Amino acid sequence: MTARSRFGLPARTLVPVLITLVALLIVVFNHSLQLREYRMLVEEEQSLSLIERLSVEQSRFEQQIEQDNPLQLRRMVAELALRPHLTHAYLTDTGDRIVGSLARADAGRPLADVLAADGQAGAALAGAVQSPERPLHIEVDAGRTALIGVLPLGSGYRLLVRSDLTLPLAQRLHRSRSELWRHAATILCWSFVLSVFLHLIWFRRAARLTEAARAFGRGRLDTRVSLGGSDELAEIGNAFNDMAERLQAQHMALRDSERHFRVMFEQAAVGVARIDTRAGRFVELNRKYCDIVGYSADEMHALDFMRLTHPDDLAADLQQMDGLRNGQIREFSMDKRLFHKDGRTVWVTLSVSPLWAPGDEPDFHLAVIQDITARREAEQALRLERNRLREAERIARLGSWEFYPALGRRWWSHQMFDFFGLDPDQGMPDNETYLACMHPDDRPRMRDVLARMGDSNLDSVEVFRTDPARGPVRHLQPSIQRVPDPVGGLVKYAGTLLDVSDIVAAERAVRESEERLRATLEQAPNVAVQWFDASGCVLYWNRASTRLYGWSPDEAIGRTAAQLMLLDDDADRFVRMLASVERTGVSVGPYEYRVRTRSGEQKHVESATFRIPGERGEHIFVCMDIDVTARRHAEQAVEQERTHLQTLFASLPDMVWLKSPDGLYLSCNRMFERLVGLREAELLGRTDYDLFPRDTADYFRAHDERAIRAGCRSTNEEWVTLADTGEHLLLQTIKTPMRNAAGELIGVLGIARDITELRSTQDSLSRLNQELEQRVADRTQALSEAIKELESFSYAVSHDLKAPLRGIDGYSKILLEDYGDVLDETAQRFLNNIRNGAGQMHALIEDLLAYSRMERRSIEASRVDLGELVQGLLERRADEFAAASARIVGGVPSIVVRADRQGVEMVLRNLLDNALKFSRDARPPIITLEASVEQGRVLLSIRDNGIGFDMKYHERIFEIFQRLHRSEEFAGTGVGLALVRKAMQRMGGRVWADSAPGEGACFHLEFPA
Amino acid sequence: MMSVARPQPAVRPILLVEDNPVDIDLTRRAFARSRSLGPISVAHDGEQALGMIPRWDAGERPPSLILLDINLPRVNGIEVLRQLKAHPKYRCIPVIMLSSSSEDRDLADAYTLGVNSYIVKPVDYDRFVEAAGHIERYWGELNQHPT
């Protein structure tokens, strides 16, 4: 490939072209600079020349203007035309009128007109004239093609000239262009020379190097390059040669290695495959791999390992692959199944290692497989055999073992371990472990057996048991066989252990079962069992037999039934019966007959007899007797009771009958016979419809059914007419469904009583009651009105009485206060007496009010704690008690009564006040409190050691206004105790006192519970 | 500490509703020494007491406190109390029952209707004067109520 620049040209072409272009550009740029310089030069030259000329002309013109010589002036203007390049010249006077011009026709015309007609040059001149008055000046016109000069000449004259620059400029440019061409030619020559030079020393060698590299790249590894010189290119050439040398050597080595590896890969005894890790496709694989799975290499390329892998193994494989992919594991190995092309399964050991460097993206991995199907199958077969053997041993409960005495080593089959509950993984047990598995009682014997196995001949060992601590005890029957070497020496013992637990258990069960049966026979409480032989001799005699007949087993065995218990008449019959049972094999009974006991008492027994085989093939006869004497007696008693009942039933004054659930008469008494006019025997089997009119029968039947439905007694009343006397009676009939012990309905019992008289008595009684109630209501009404009146009366009295009292007391007080100085002592005493009287009157009114309230108010029962209440009262009176130096003895425990709290409090307050009041003279006053609960009633007593009273006044003291003392002795209204009694009565309790004069008094309270 | 004397408002009268002239006289005397309570005006029965209401409406100063007996001619004290306490404007005037009755029924009726205090008129004049002192101290000095 040729080295090309980005413009698509080879460097050997591009470089000379670029050099040439750059040189030409420089020349053109230089030329353009020169052109500008030339133009300025020309303008400057021409300006200087014009200024010089005009300056010369100025003095001449000013002289002529001064002499006012127009002609001369005109001439002088015309002379100016001799000056090279000058194209226009105008002399103007003060009025800008042309005095002289190069064109004669212009003289006398206004300058502006002339200039306007002169096109572009005129316009440039007109512009210069417009500019303000100033001395001589030259300017370049707009097109840079002419110089305009304006010369002021005094007296208002001006000289205006235009000099053309085009010609001098063109001459100058012509010279410059010739120079440009010369330069360009020179530069092109040099560029060509330079290009040739570069090609010779650089590009030609570079092309050679490129050629060599290209050949190397095409695989000609022996390509070398020789460039000569010692510049950079030469060094690159040398470096290339070195590199080519080394790569050629490596390539040779790699080719050898590749060949060897390929041979190994193809000839390997294991299947090797390179697999695309992402798709799982086989990229490359050897013949062995194909052989194992049965596909050709081409077929394999179309497959992936997932499709070949057995589904049961795929998950594990993929999981491992995931581990490999994310770098968790570096490689793995597993046994798995592959599907062979022909459908069978091939077991292989798979080893997988990644082909990517750690940290790189996974691309390929190497899978190595080894066919292990044969090994697998052998293992499987072996496992199967082992399991079969193990299963056989388990089913047979047979363990096999070997013992090598010389080595002291043993081998056990799996079942052996099972017998002893040992873990096969723990290895074969030693003698001590083995012994520890045995029953402690068997260990000494077995230790001896194990010891003898080492040195002597052992032919048989008895059954031994396993240790009960290791689970259910097994009975193991060992069998043992010596295995000798060719010269008769002992090599090993081989043998088995047979689990004979079931046989041992079965034997024991048979034994126990027999014992249980015998025990059952012995313990049977009411069934007397005897075994007889064919001649009637007793073979077996149980305890119940002893209890029934009084003979002990020792006495009974060997004797005949006739000797022991049969009555004389029955002896022959018994022997005949045995013969019949023997002959027919059919059991006899149960039948009842009378027997005698050892003491001669006669009893009734119920007996059954059958035969069982004896041990020697003969027949044994079993008799089972139950004592039914008591039942017999009971039946007789029942019969007697039945007779009594019949008599009672017949003689009852009430009518009694029994009907079946479907209405048939079953029984009736004599009174009922009177009603229906039939004998009981005639009545049986009939229904109400045979006896009564249809509507009556319907009514009775409905009543029966109601009782049946309700399942209990049903009562109604009905009028009937007796069949014999024609008497009309009101009957109260009770129908009761009758049920037997199992709860089944057996009939309806009817009992009817004549209540005709009773009803008429009841009717009159009820009328009387109504009258009485009306009277009570009337009285109550009157009474409550009276009470109401009394209430308002006492209310009015108490309040109206209080008002004058307040006046009496108030004015007495005011008198004492305001007129104390004019009243003498007696008058003052009288006033005080008036006040005391008013006070007593007030107390009386208050007590009366309280009494009347107690009578009227509603009692509200609530839970009242007496102890707490008394404690509160005592605390409130503490000062009073202290003032009287009174002592309180005893106390009231916390007892709860249901009472009116206010009432109880009033009662206790009054009694405590009384106790204190009447014991004020005692030294010291002692008040004793006691409380108790007796038979559900609460008793509370308050005792004082005061003056007491005679018990003949006991009732009086509880009456209102009754006092035993003058009020001077003991203040009081005589209402307090009456109030106490009233309150206790209203709360359902009572109060009483016991006392004697001078011995104190005790007041008792009793509260309902 | 400085105490600022508040201008004492003109003391409003007390209304005593009582029919018994002796009680009226004694009540006046008992309250005679009172400084914090105003002068006592008297209504002699319930009707007269209720007749005060239109006069209050007409601009007469309502009382600061009403002492009300229960047993009154024509309209009894409980009825007077009921109408006073049902009145939208004058139900704020404190009413003290001053009666001889200590009946539960009267107490319950009075408190149900919203009486402010119930005092059983003592018969003993000393205690009556004492009670008047307490009423004055409590209702005249301690208690604050809307004017």
Image (cartoon, rainbow, N blue to C red):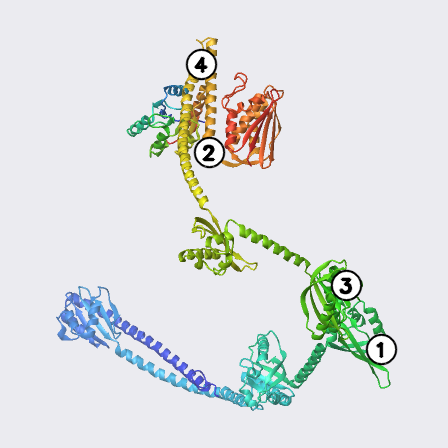
Q: Which residue is mark 3?
A: A564
Residue linked to disc 2: A858
Residue A734: in sight, yes or no? yes
What label sits on residue A458 in the rendered view?
A: 1
Q: Secondary structure at mark 4?
A: helix
Q: Secondary structure at mark 2?
A: loop
Q: Which mark is residue A817?
A: 4
The chain letter under disc 2 is A
Q: Are marks 4 and 1 on the same chain?
A: yes
Q: Is residue A476 above or below residue A874?
A: below
From the viewer's side, name the closer residue of A13 and A516.
A516
Report the mark closest to the observer, 4 or 1.
1
Mark 2 neighbour density, 10 Å: few (under 14) some (14–19) many (20 or more)? few
- Where residue A457 sits in the image (x, y, percent)? 86, 78
The answer to which of marks 1 and 2 sits earlier in the sequence is 1
Q: Relative to A994, is B24 on the left or the right?
A: left
Judging depth in this view, the residue of A408 and B83 nearest the camera is B83
Disc with the residue nearer the chain's start (1 vs 3):
1
Q: CA–CA distance between discs 3 and 2?
A: 90 Å
Of marks 4 and 1, which one's residue comes earlier in the chain? 1
Quarter containing the C terminus of chain A? top right
Q: Which amino acid type corresponds to the residue marked 1 in the rendered image?
A: Leu
